[in-house]
């Protein structure tokens, strides 16, 4: 259904900013490197960002000093910088050279036209190891080989001087994973540190403030090491057990203790540390963790432990020669879920159901006869008899024996009250089965599911009058988070791989919902680590070697797409600039293997429902998209010669695509599949005179498929956009809100709480993961099409943006909220009869162009500045 939209009135409500002129402009939400008060900064020019409440200001003064009191009193001693009419509420530090191990305080002041100055609350950032020479001591490990199963724990007692401590910090890195404790207490609630990298290229270290945990006199530090991806002992299809970096876990740690008299002590890793086997008798990031409670040493990380039977640690080479700070949001347990149901199959089999599919671990509190062995199985499905079904998850697992079962933890009880939570593993699951070798008694109170992921801030939300849309949105968010573990993965159970295609397909879903720049900046460094000399990338990153199955333009275009989207959403060009040469080398490689601007290098439209699209067309379109991004980046960075080269190349590719695949008479590309038509429209290669006809043919194809998608992965991303951007928003919504197979809604009405890998999951032993993010791009479409919130790449970071909501037939109300770098954006519309009320909020410092469809005269545009606004729209059926 199409409407003639007339603007009845523009009612400015109590305009939050303009009507509150007496409210001062107050800087708030101060961040350094997108983190609040970080203590692990090791770069020389950190980025400082803030938002503003109250009224707008034309002048911002950034002040940096070492003393918070002097800073508040206007006596900074490091840097004083003024921004006039800034395009972004951000600045890159350019003051005196930053010193290591130093806390810097900073604030932002606004200055209005009459000279009134308002100062933010002071924030801080603290530097860590600014040079490799700042590290002391060496890397240490045990004397075991890579196949030795038990995890080792290390300890050292040390004395602290009898004087007042001003600060104490721990700096620690590991090949593998670590859990750190001081005087018997875990140092942090963070999990699975450090994040996964190509260990032979780059290692990450963390900084922890332990001032309150260390006292005068005797102290003890404990470190337990896990294998992680560094010493992969399990066997799977990606051969990480054959990684060139593989070695016994090791670590490097420095404790720096500063006293109020100006002196400093260091506690470092060396061969005076001691180690012993831990009660974790096997651990695999991929399959599970095995724990023997009988091997617990209760005081191993406390003062006074009898460690006479412990061995001395050994020095070992560093995994790589590059050690950098892990400046990103950490992995944490974000929720604890009680079971919603328990079934008992005798006193040796207990099955638990949780409210949703998730990624994480369990906590089990249990008491049983000493030596009782529990097998704790995690699954997403169950068989008709109620037993857990792992057939879809152990698809790639190649167990070397019964002692490495997939998604199974094995616990041996001590006869006392035992508590078990894996330290170095996570799984994807909704159901848990506890099988016991001897009778035990369990209740729902004995077990919790611990949901885990990178603990990134939420920045977006949607709500609509259609409950199915709301469920799809929540499922997309859950699957996105379940696949965020310091890098974006495809699924949290059977693979845990950083598939490049899955990540760029779902990038808008991530950016609208979460503040994820720290994760992607880390991950794109992983790209730099593994790029081949000829410019290629593996299909999964991090990678230990050139993993070439599945790599190709449609997957590894993530190297261009993600930095460009980050630039659009954050208005920050640092990542794009850092990746510029990598993108260029990559594009140049594609050019070298392409014939007349076309390439067949790629997987194509992965997992098609029925019809198969031309992979040469889809790969060439991604090639075109990469070159367009590279040309835009060249313009942005003033690389004029590159700009000319890649604009010319882009036009060559576009012409070749149209010459080879476009049938002008029929107005179709290739054979006219949904993916082929939608991709050509999405990537804007269709000649202008034919856009409406190609869009009409796409509509007819969808209509012939009873308003269902008939695509693979690539088409699932572009179909909805191609329809809604070309006048068929009602059709796009009809596809998006379907509840019959194949559709997202079909999953929802059949109990899904996450996004699946494949559409047909009706068979008991289907092969698909039930927690995949790759088909979750629809959530970005909700924000952009139904909510209409779109970044403007000419003024990125939402300095200016587009509001172009689609008032689709069948939906009575829709609301989208997004916390932009400037502040909250809200887009809410509601239908009442023939009238639509549209409310929207534009943050301070931003402006927006409102585009309303008018099918008689074309789109109407209205420009608005910051404030809360309401429009009344009369929609008459054409």
Image: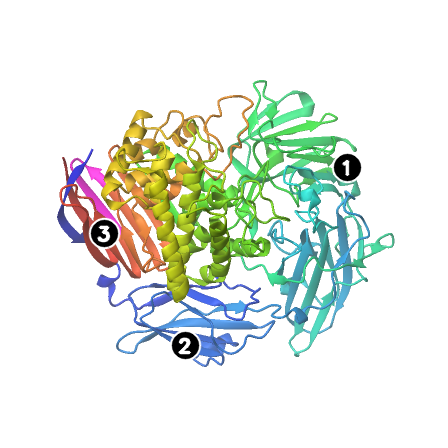
Q: Residues within 10 Å of mark 2 (few under 14, many from 20)?
A: some
| Range covered by the magenta-colored residues | 830-840
- Mark found first going from the N terminus, 1 or 3: 1
200 sits left or right of 118 in the view = right
| CB-based contact (under 8 Å), mark 3 and mark 2 | no
Instruction: Identify the residue at horizontal 71%, vertical 49% (top origin).
Output: 246
Instruction: Identify the residue at horizontal 22%, vertical 49% (top origin).
Output: 851
**Residue 230 horizontal/vertical position (percent):** 68, 49
State the SS at label 1.
loop
The residue to which callout 1 is attached is: 414
The number of discs equals 3
How far is mark 3 from mark 2, CA to CA? 35 Å
Is 27 situated above or below 609? below
The residue to which callout 2 is attached is: 81
Q: Residues within 10 Å of mark 1 (few under 14, many from 20)?
A: many
**Residue 198 horizontal/vertical position (percent):** 63, 53
State the SS at label 2.
strand
């Amino acid at each position: 259904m199409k409407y003639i939209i007339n603007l009845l009135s523009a009612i400015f409500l109590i305009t939050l900013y303009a009507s509150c002129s007496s409210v001062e402009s107050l800087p708030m939400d101060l961040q350094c490197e997108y983190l609040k008060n970080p203590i692990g900064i090791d770069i020389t020019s950190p980025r400082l960002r803030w938002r503003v409440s109250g009224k707008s200001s034309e002048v911002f003064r950034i002040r940096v000093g070492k003393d918070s009191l002097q800073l508040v009193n206007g006596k900074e001693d490091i840097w004083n910088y003024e921004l006039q009419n800034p395009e972004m509420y951000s600045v890159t530090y350019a003051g005196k050279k930053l010193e290591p191990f130093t806390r810097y305080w900073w604030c932002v002041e606004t200055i209005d036209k009459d000279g009134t100055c308002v100062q933010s609350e002071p924030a801080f950032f603290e530097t860590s190891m600014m040079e490799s020479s700042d590290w002391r001591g060496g890397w240490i490990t045990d004397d075991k080989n890579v196949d030795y199963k038990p995890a080792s724990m290390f300890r050292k007692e040390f004395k602290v001087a009898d004087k007042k401590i001003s600060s104490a910090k721990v700096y620690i890195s590991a090949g593998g994973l670590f859990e750190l404790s001081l005087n018997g207490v875990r140092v942090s609630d963070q999990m699975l540190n450090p994040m996964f990298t190509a260990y032979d290229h780059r290692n990450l270290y963390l900084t922890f403030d332990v001032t309150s945990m260390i006292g005068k006199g005797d102290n003890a530090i404990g470190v337990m090491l896990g294998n992680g991806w560094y010493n992969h002992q399990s066997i799977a299809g990606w051969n990480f057990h054959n990684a060139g970096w593989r070695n016994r876990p090791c670590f490097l740690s420095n404790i720096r203790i500063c006293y109020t008299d100006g002196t400093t002590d260091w506690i470092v890793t060396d061969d005076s540390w001691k180690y012993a086997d831990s009660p974790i008798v096997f651990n695999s990031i991929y399959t599970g963790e095995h724990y023997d409670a009988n091997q617990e040493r209760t005081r191993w990380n406390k003062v006074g432990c009898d460690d006479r039977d412990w061995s001395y640690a050994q020095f070992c080479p560093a995994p790589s020669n590059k050690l950098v700070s892990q400046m990103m949001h950490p992995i944490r347990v974000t929720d604890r879920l009680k079971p919603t149901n328990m079934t008992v199959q005798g006193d040796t089999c207990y099955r638990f159901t949780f409210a949703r599919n998730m990624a994480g671990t369990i906590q089990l509190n249990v008491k049983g006869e000493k030596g009782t062995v529990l097998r704790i199985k995690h699954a997403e499905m169950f068989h008709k008899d109620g037993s857990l079904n792992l057939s879809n998850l152990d698809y790639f697992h190649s167990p070397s024996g019964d002692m490495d079962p997939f998604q199974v933890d094995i616990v041996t009880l001590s006869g006392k009250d035992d508590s078990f939570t894996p330290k170095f593993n996570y799984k994807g699951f909704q159901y848990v089965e506890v099988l016991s070798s001897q009778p035990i008694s369990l209740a729902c109170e004995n077990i919790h599911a611990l949901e885990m992921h990178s603990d990134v801030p939420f920045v977006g939300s949607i709500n609509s009058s259609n409950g199915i849309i709301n469920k799809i949105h929540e499922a997309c968010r859950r699957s996105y988070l379940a696949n965020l573990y310091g890098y974006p993965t495809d699924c949290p159970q059977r693979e845990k791989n950083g598939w490049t295609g899955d990540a760029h397909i779902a990038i808008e879903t991530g950016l609208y919902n979460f503040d994820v720049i720290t994760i992607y900046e880390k991950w794109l460094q992983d790209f730099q680590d593994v790029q081949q000399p000829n410019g290629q990338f593996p299909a999964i990153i991090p990678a230990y070697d050139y993993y070439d199955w599945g790599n190709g333009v449609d997957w590894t275009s993530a190297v261009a797409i993600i930095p460009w989207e980050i630039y659009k959403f954050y208005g920050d060009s640092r990542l794009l600039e850092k990746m510029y040469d990598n993108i260029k080398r990559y594009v140049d490689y594609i050019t070298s293997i392409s014939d007349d601007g076309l390439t067949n290098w790629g997987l194509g439209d992965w997992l098609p429902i029925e019809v198969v699209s031309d992979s040469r067309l889809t790969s060439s379109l991604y090639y075109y998209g990469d070159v367009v991004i590279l040309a835009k980046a060249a313009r942005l960075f003033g690389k004029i010669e590159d700009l000319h080269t890649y604009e010319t190349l882009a036009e060559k590719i576009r012409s070749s695509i149209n010459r080879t695949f476009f049938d002008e008479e029929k107005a179709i590309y290739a054979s006219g599949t949904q993916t082929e038509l939608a991709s050509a429209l999405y990537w804007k290669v269709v000649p202008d005179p034919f856009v409406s006809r190609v869009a009409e043919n796409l509509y007819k194809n969808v209509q012939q498929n009873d308003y269902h998608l008939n695509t693979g992965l690539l088409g699932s991303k572009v179909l909805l956009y191609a329809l809604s951007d070309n006048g068929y928003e009602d059709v796009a919504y009809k596809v998006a809100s379907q509840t019959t197979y194949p559709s997202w809604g079909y999953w929802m009405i059949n109990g899904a709480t996450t996004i699946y890998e494949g559409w047909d999951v009706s068979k008991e032993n289907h092969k698909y993961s039930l927690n995949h993010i790759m088909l979750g791009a629809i959530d970005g479409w909700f924000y952009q099409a139904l909510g209409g919130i779109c970044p403007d790449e000419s003024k990125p970071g939402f300095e200016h943006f587009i509001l172009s909501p689609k008032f689709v037939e069948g939906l009575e109300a829709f609301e989208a909220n997004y916390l932009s770098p400037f502040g909250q954006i809200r887009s809410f519309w509601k239908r009442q009869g023939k009238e639509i009320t549209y409310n929207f909020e534009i943050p301070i410092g931003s402006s927006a162009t409102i585009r309303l469809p008018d099918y008689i005269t074309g789109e109407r545009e209205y420009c608005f500045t910051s404030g809360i606004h309401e429009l009344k729209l009369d929609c008459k059926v054409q």
